[in-house]
Amino acid sequence: MRVSYNKLKHNLKINWLERLEKLPAADYKLRTVKSWQDVYHFVFLPVYKEDYSVVSGCIEGLLKANYPRSKMAVIVSWEERAGVETENMVKEVEKNYKNFFYELAVVKHPDGLPGEMRGKGSNTAYGAKFAKENIIDPRGIPYDHILVSNFDADTIVSPEYFGVLTHTFLTSGNPLRASYQPIPLYVNNIWEAPSIARVVAFSATFWHTIKQEKHETATTFSSHSMPWQALVDVGFWQKNMVSEDSRIFWQCFLRYDGDYRVVPLYYPVSMDANVAPTFGQTVKNIYKQQRRWAYGAENIPYFLFGFIKNKAIPRIKKLHYGFMVVEGNHSWATNAIIIFALGWLPIFLGGSAFNQTVLSFNLPYLTRLIMTLSMAGLISSAVLSIILLPPRPPKYGKFKYFWMMAQWVLFPVTRPRAGLF
């Protein structure tokens, strides 16, 4: 986590647009691109009953990005079932921001289309088809010159996001066979969140910070970017499942015979922590969010059957990814129970013979030692959480920082893990 954070901190200090301008075209790995200014960014924002302030906050972040807006298109895809209030909201968004980008389109996703499950995947797939038929194909924009960013509506990009994304895209080997993953920081509303929500939010951030260093087994998660060419090749996001963010990785992995990967950006995007009007509702929403992330387990039968059918994927890759993902999901479900039971369950079940052994006597002390040593990581997390905090709102006193540190005593009862192997 510390190694990954140091890279993030380094990247935050760089003017990536300036670095792009100095990058020789000879260093581009994608030979069809003659200048970084040939690269377009299409940002998809799926909307369902979000407030105007949430969607406009995301778009304001895009306006502040250090990248030519003439090369940025925004597709706001809203759900018909969200009703008149959402329709009026997106019309207001269109009215206020229409003229600031290469294109800003508001697309209504009809409810109840055959073969669709309600969710982000079906929404953005519909928006992507609209963009292809009404913007990209009529204007003849080359598919390999387009990067797609599929963002949650509350995502706020850091100013140099599209610069570092474009630079990474142009300098990575075989750039059309990769997705590009930022680090999600759940800090937009972190000062307003209750302690348990803050611990879960920061733990999610730290897990994905770690995953930047373990990118050889990473899959895409939440807000991320990828080549338009790859998206077209696999037929866009699947419309009948929950975890479209990780499924799109497996679609590409199978489509390209295992020649697809996740490239870490070591750069953040910020999103909302889970906050509700009451503490009870917040806890309920946190549980639903963790459950929704765990739905990524639905990818296991998809890619395992894909491995069986696709003989071109190297066997070592099949074994490596298969073990990591299956073991990761299993550990997510069982590790907390194992750790909780480690100290006393053997004594309870071992019988009188085991209880007379030296191991039986020392087992609780060994468990305590392991837990004590693990506190080093917890202390690092607490310190890093303070560093990553956005500016403190004036309504909160400096004493709030104390609670930001003290909140980590709640970590054992939250046991969040924000992502899959």
Image (spheres, rainbow, N blue to C red):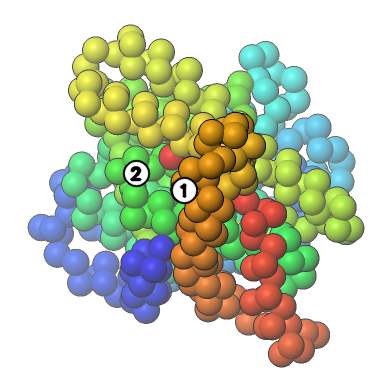
The mark found on residue 262 in the picture is 2
- In the figure, 124 relative to 314: above or below? below
Residue 12 vs residue 384: left or right? left
Residue 153 % position (x, y):
65, 51
Label pair 2/1, CB-CB below 8 angstroms: no
Tally of numbered discs? 2
Crowding at dot 1, Cα within 10 Å, few <14 / some 14-19 / many 20+, comes out as: few
Residue at 31% x, 39% y is 261
Tell me the kind of residue under disc 1.
Answer: Val
Residue at 33% x, 17% y is 307
Q: Secondary structure at mark 1?
A: helix
Tell me the mark number nearer the camera, choosing from 2 and 1: 1
Instruction: Give whichever of 391, 155 is nearer the camera.
Output: 391
Residue at 33% x, 11% y is 308
Q: CA distance from mark 2 to mark 1?
A: 48 Å
- In the figure, 3 relative to 247: above or below? below
If you read the primary sequence from the N terminus, does the residue marked by circle 2 or circle 1 appear first?
2
The residue to which callout 1 is attached is: 358
Tell me the kind of residue under disc 2.
Answer: Val
**Residue 250 sits in quarter:** top left
Residue 394 % position (x, y):
76, 87
Instruction: Give whichever of 348, 107 is nearer the camera.
Output: 348
Residue at 53% x, 77% y is 383
Residue 232 seen from this side: no
Residue 81 seen from this side: yes
**Residue 1 sits in quarter:** bottom left
Residue 265 % position (x, y):
36, 58
Q: Residue furthest left?
A: 26
